[in-house]
Amino acid sequence: MAEEYAKQLFLQEKPTLALLAISSSTKTYASVITKEINSTFAHTTKILSKMKEHGLVEFTVEGRVKYVELTDHGMNVVGALKNLIIAIGEEPGAKSINASVSPDKQSSTSEMSDTSSSQAIQKKIDQLSSKIESIYDTAIENGADKNAMSLKLGPFNRDIAMTEKMIESSNYQIDESVINSLNDVRARIESILNQ
């Protein structure tokens, strides 16, 4: 049943996009997700209901707004989806090369995999940093106060945490420079939010 559900849900574009959209915000709601994934409201609410049934999201009501947030299980699934996206982006056959290489040459092939994995995560960190700086610059130009800045940039803390989990759960050795880059992005967002 769970495997059938996974095939039906996460091998489809809209549910995957919905889950990733939820992960990029600390609190969001169905109409925002609908716009982000270019779907109908009815389809989005159906997707969210299925996700709730399987413990991926939870709803909270504040006033007249019904927010949706990831559960811990949902965060684990998002991490797996992001790892899948990174794996798909790697060069074809990167892992299968190891199987056909003699043991004395496997270490150099492993280093190549380590490098490509580090590069993929570094690319994600660079994109995250670029988004943060762009949003910050726009907010400064528009004269945003500390609360507005927090609302715009706060959700990126979840992306930073997800990237950190990706590094921790990687099957490959991640370069120290990648970890330092992530720490720099974390320090930058903290300095912006604490201004």
Image: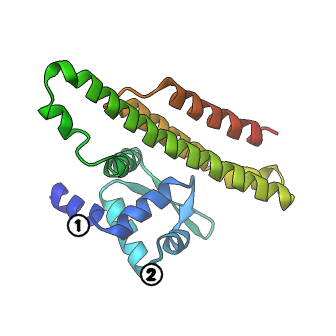
**The C terminus lies in which quarter of the figure?**
top right
From the viewer's side, name the closer residue of 178 and 1.
178
Q: In this figure, which residue is indicated by the disc labeled 2?
A: 40
Percent of width and height locating residue 90: 34, 46
The relative height of residue 184 versus residue 7 in the rendered view (above or below) is above
Q: Which amino acid type is marked by label 2? A: Thr
Q: Residue at x 13, y 24 (%)?
A: 102
Name the image colouring.
rainbow
Query: In the displayed structure, would residue 3 be above or below residue 47?
Result: above
Q: Secondary structure at mark 2?
A: loop
Q: Quadrant of the N terminus?
A: bottom left
Camera-side residue: 26 or 11? 11
Q: Is residue 112 visible?
A: yes
Q: Residue furthest right?
A: 143
Tell me the residue that label 1 is attached to: 8
* Residue at the image point whose x is 70% and y is 54% from the top: 134
Q: Position of residue 152 (x, y in %)?
A: 69, 55
On the picture, is 144 further left or further right than 64?
Answer: right
User: Considering only vertical position in the picture, is 82 above or below 105?
Assistant: below
Residue name at image x 44 percent, y 78 percent: 39
Question: Element under label 1?
Answer: helix
Rendering coords of residue 53 (x, y %): 31, 61
Question: Mark 1 near mark 2, Cβ–Cβ under 8 Å?
Answer: no
Q: Answer few, some or many: residues within 10 Å of disc 1's Cα (few below 14, many 20 plus, some between 14 and 19).
A: few
Residue 103 in the image, given as x and y percentages of width and height: 15, 21
Residue 62 falls in which quadrant of the image? Answer: bottom right
Query: Type of residue at label 1?
Result: Gln
Mark closest to the chain's N terminus, 1 or 2: 1
Q: Residues within 10 Å of mark 2 (few under 14, many from 20)?
A: few
Q: CA distance from mark 1 to mark 2?
A: 18 Å
